[in-house]
Image (spheres, rainbow, N blue to C red):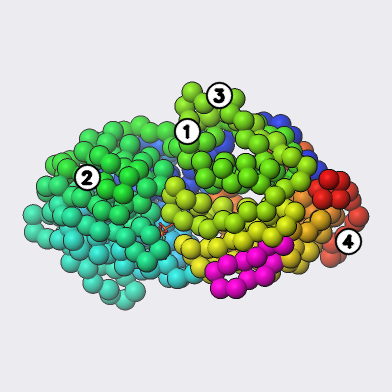
Amino acid sequence: MDVFVIEGGRRLDGSIAVQGAKNAALPLMATALLTDEPITIRDAPDLADIRNMARLLEELGCETKRQGHRLSLRTADRTQSHARYDVVRTMRASICVLGPLLARRGEARVSMPGGCTIGDRPVDLHLRGLEALGAQIDLDAGDIVARAPVGGLRGARIFLGGPFGSTVLGTANIMSAATLARGTTTIESAACEPEIVDLARLLNAMGAKISGAGSPRIVVQGVDSLGGADHRVMPDRIEAGTLMCAAAITNGDLTLENCPLDALLVLWDLLHRIGVRIDPIDETDPLRATCRITTERSLRPVQVTTQPHPGFPTDLQAQLMALLCLAEGNSIVTEKIFSERFMHVPELARMGASLHRAGATVVVSGVRRLRGAPVMASDLRASAGLVLAGLAAEGTTIVNRVYHLDRGYERLDERLIQLGAKIERVDEKDLESPPTIAVMPGVARLASA
Ligand code: EPZ
């Protein structure tokens, strides 16, 4: 297993382009199940999750081909509709094949995703939505077995609000399935995430009739069939936000290209309050902007609560928390989407952060500096938070199990190195001895303020 060995204390400086969004690309890929014509997805990041989704689609009868960041997908065989446990357990997003399979083939068998390190992740809203479209749903040997009624799915009014807001992949599933249902489907309390807008854009290019994506009410007029399309994935707002926090935590000066600024207004506002400047350079397309990130000498604390879009995203909570560890005062971070998503907290504490957790809230008392330590990555975004902390810490940080990070960030180490970071990717077996904590200048903001 690879680890990152990070020598902290180097300011990030330079330009970097944001990659295509993993969380947009996954449901986009599943649209290939809705048609026999080719779907081309450009800017698809080269990540383990994307490769797993391609493998799953191949098992479901799709031909897939990758050329660089271009993915070509085409359904060649519609006989196999079983998304097996072996694949689903490696990637929860496999659930987004359920709606498309059911709509086009009339039946689907998808292994029920289990919980994961960020908490229980039920799929009841997905199932309720499909039932409202007329599907019969059973559970058999750990698989969700869904069957469309004779004559196919039929449009309905569906409420997708749950105890923690709407559901992103649930909205993707129901919206995709409804494209081929008879009549009109209205999804109330739909997820408003930009990835849903991106999916609606591709589906409409395939011939679907969807309006309202990006708002809590989506209306889908069913059509008889869908055709092929060519689509460029939106840039990854979470990667962009992570890079903004990386610039801020290292006191750096970064220019972000292909940045979905318009999808990051909440982070922009928060960072402004913290003392981080984001200056747009080119906003001709606000979803593909160029902007510059610089910081003031000291960081101010904030209160932040994760919420569905357009609120502060749970997928940036760990990265922002790493930054707040170095703010001057007490910040309060509350996690409202996945209340157990705090695996990074004890690891940041190992680096000298002062954190007090009570339930779904963490009080972050800013410290003058973080110190390098061996830490354990436990999920994708927690890993990103630890890498950011390592970039700012004095001395050497070893981030173990970076395969989590590799699921969501393409070659992050190489790209940060180009910006001035000192990171080495090594096989943990080749680590000669436990890291020595060399005393390096670090990014001691308060000391120098
Ligand atoms: C998507 O997961 C993302 N994954 C997650 O990104 C992200 O954290 C999450 O949305 C929230 O923004 C992908 O897009 C592949 P949800 P999803 O259904 O759709 C509850 C990352 O780091 N809920 O919107 O699975 C649920 O427990 C990842 O890239 C139900 O109660 O999340 C949670 O509290 C991890 N019943 C809330 O809703 C359901 O049927 C939102 O979950 C479904 C969800």
Amino acid at the residue labelled 4: Thr
The residue at the far right in this view is 439
Answer above or below: position of 304 versus 31. below
Q: Secondary structure at mark 3?
A: strand
| Residue situated in front as seen by the camera: 80 or 5 | 5
**Considering only vertical position in the picture, is 114 above or below 312?**
below
Toward which corner of the image does residue 382 lie, by quadrant?
A: bottom right
Label 1 to label 3: alpha-carbon separation:
11 Å
Q: Earlier in the sequence, mark 2 or mark 3?
A: 2
Q: Earlier in the sequence, mark 1 or mark 2?
A: 2
Q: Position of residue 274 (x, y in %)?
A: 66, 46
Amino acid type at mark 1? Leu
Q: Nearer the viewer, residue 379 or 317?
A: 317
Indicate the amino acid at tag 3: Asp
The reply to whether the C-beta atoms of the residues labelled 2 and 3 are less than 8 Å apart is: no
Marks 2 and 4 sit apart, C-alpha to C-alpha, by 59 Å
Secondary structure of residue under mark 4: loop
Tell me the residue that label 4 is attached to.
436
In which quadrant is the C terminus drawn? top right
Q: Nearer the viewer, mark 2 or mark 4?
A: 2
Which of the numbered marks, if any, corresponds to residue 287? 1
- Residue 359 is covered by the magenta coloring: yes
* Location of residue 326 in the rendering, given as x and y in whole percent from the top left corner: 74, 54
Residue found 27% across the figure and 36% down from its top: 204
What residue type is disc 2 on?
Val
